[in-house]
Image (cartoon, rainbow, N blue to C red):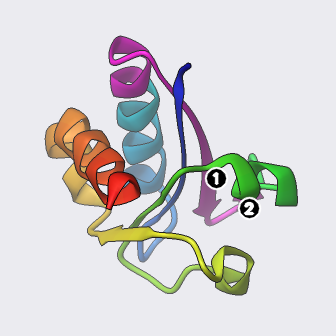
Amino acid sequence: MKRKLIAVTACATGIAHTYMAEKALRKAAKEMDVLIKVETQGATGIGNRLNEKDVQIGEAVIFATDTKVRDSERFAGKKILDINVSDPIKDAKKVIKDALALADK
């Protein structure tokens, strides 16, 4: 069975890094055969919003952010890997491995 993660990406300005981190996480997850849904919280608002079902099936949540996550109460009780938005841009596979390890704890 495929592993399932969810993520939120957001940078202070809500432009480049938000979407670069999203793209890096999606690419790495595909290469690692992990399902991931990534919500972007950018300058244009929330994109690809995670719904209640997404949150329930996500084994862990990746907050790749340099700003406060909007509506963070949706993730209450979930295991959260809280990292800088630049981390997945540098090494998305490590971020996914870390999130899966957190889910297994």
Indicate the amino acid at tag 2: Ile
| Residue where numbered disc 2 is placed | 46
Residue 72 location (% of width, % of height): 65, 82
- Which label's residue is closer to the chain start, 2 or 1? 1
* Residue at horizontal 56 percent and vertical 19 percent from the top: 1
Tell me the distance, in whole angstroms, between the alpha carbons under discs 2 and 1: 7 Å
Label 1 packing within 10 angstroms: few (<14), some (14-19), many (20+): many
- For numbered disc 2, what is the local secondary structure? strand
User: In the image shown, does 3 or 70 lie closer to the viewer?
Assistant: 3
In this rendering, position of residue 37 left or right of residue 65: right
Q: Quadrant of residue 38?
A: top right
User: In the image shown, does 90 or 53 lie closer to the viewer?
Assistant: 53
**Vertical relation: 100 (above or below) 12:** above
In this rendering, position of residue 84 left or right of residue 50: left
* Residue at horizontal 56 percent and vertical 79 percent from the top: 69
Task: Give the label on residue 39, or none.
Answer: 1
Residue 9 location (% of width, % of height): 49, 59
In this rendering, does residue 89 appear at all?
A: yes
Indicate the amino acid at tag 1: Glu
User: Is residue 62 covered in magenta?
Assistant: no
User: Is residue 28 covered in magenta?
Assistant: yes
Task: Give the label on residue 56, or none.
Answer: none
CB-based contact (under 8 Å), mark 2 and mark 1: yes
In this rendering, position of residue 61 left or right of residue 102: right
Q: Give the range drawn in magenta.
A: 27-47
- For numbered disc 1, what is the local secondary structure? strand
Residue 45 location (% of width, % of height): 74, 65
**Vertical relation: 9 (above or below) 4:** below
In this rendering, does residue 47 appear at all?
A: no
* Residue at horizontal 23 percent and vertical 57 percent from the top: 86
* Residue at horizontal 43 percent and vertical 70 percent from the top: 80
Label 2 packing within 10 angstroms: few (<14), some (14-19), many (20+): some
